[in-house]
Amino acid sequence: MSLIQLGEAMQLRALRYFSQVAKSHSLREAADKLFVTPTAVTRQIELLEHYYGASLIERSPRGIKLTREGEYLAQVIQVTLRELDTVKEKISSSQSIVSGSIRICSAESLIAPFICPAINDFRLLHPKVNFEIEVGSAPHVAEALISDKADIAATFYMPVNAEILITHSCSLKHKILMTSNHPLASKSMLSLKDIAQYPIAIPPSNFSVRQLLESSAKREGVTLDMRFITNSIEVQKRLAVMGLAIIIMPELTVDDMSTQERLISVPLSDSVMGMVKVDLGLPKQRAISMATKTFHEVLSRRIEAQNMRQ
């Protein structure tokens, strides 16, 4: 018997609430994402526990942990909800309406220049589609696509994997950002030796820009002052605006932030670090929804447009 046939105690709301708790590992975080109170989430989980006659979650000071029964139910619910979304989409498609939800996982610095403009273009034609957007490093983005936590992914140097289809790519120039009164601000071009004299704010070692920078510095025999390590672009920008560090960003992201943040950008002259590759990916083995397919077409056009500018 499927979950859809289990009766009144198994309302769709309860399934969706439990699914979100399983993803969040926190009642409060799940409630925030569902735009309800934690009490409402607890009530729905209690309905499920009453129906199955088993505890589905364990509470601890560190948050929520699923029991063995809860883990099994979470797996089944995920499949069921995806099937229900597919049915909804097929019904909408028969009425010439693109609907449903699209889960995007992306490098944070690609959100402003690519993802958000593509969403804006897409929603002008398909306003009934919802979006879930997550950011992370290239390994995180790839894993989200492989594990069916994302429908479409964009990152720098997508890890090679048999389950990922890289559909489009483009290259962006890396630039160094700093305040207008920084000693390097008057330069027309910068080398790794130039920036080695000053503190840098850079992401952790699982990010491609960090890996490229370390590899290039080693090749040039340069020791860099990686004073600030953070995976947040906002933190990097604040440190740069305050004059505490210089930061390295792709060209389009620089265009998006430099005027607003009053930062100066200078190209980086390095055979490896000077350019960075952007990859757009889809799951190779898994079928994608009509909404994802249509959004992919919109996003891929923006990536192709970047290739035309080079």
Image: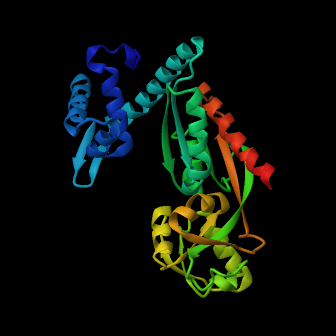
Whether residue 121 is visible here, answered yes or no, is yes
Residue 278, given in percent of the width and then of the height, sits at 69, 54
Residue 243, given in percent of the width and then of the height, sits at 49, 79
Q: Nearer the viewer, residue 32 or 215?
A: 32
What residue is drawn where x is 52% and y is 27%?
127
* Colouring style: rainbow
Q: If the image is split into quadrants, where does the C terminus sit?
A: bottom right
Locate residue 4: give its quadrant: top left
Locate residue 165: give its quadrant: top right
Residue 52 in the figure: left or right of residue 137? left
Locate residue 69: give its quadrant: top left
Whether residue 100 is situated above or below residue 21 in the rendered picture = above
Q: Nearer the viewer, residue 239 or 182?
A: 182
Whether residue 163 is visible here, answered yes or no, is no
Whether residue 291 is situated above or below residue 140 in the rendered picture = above
Q: Nearer the viewer, residue 123 or 107?
A: 123
Residue 226 in the figure: left or right of residue 28? right
What residue is drawn where x is 61% and y is 40%?
118
What residue is drawn where x is 78% and y is 53%?
309
Residue 102, given in percent of the width and then of the height, sits at 53, 34
What residue is drawn where x is 60% and y is 86%?
183
Residue 243 in the figure: left or right of residue 57? right
Q: If the image is split into quadrants, where does the N terminus sit?
A: top left
Whether residue 291 is situated above or below residue 156 in the rendered picture = above
Residue 27 in the figure: left or right of residue 224? left
Residue 166, given in percent of the width and then of the height, sits at 71, 44
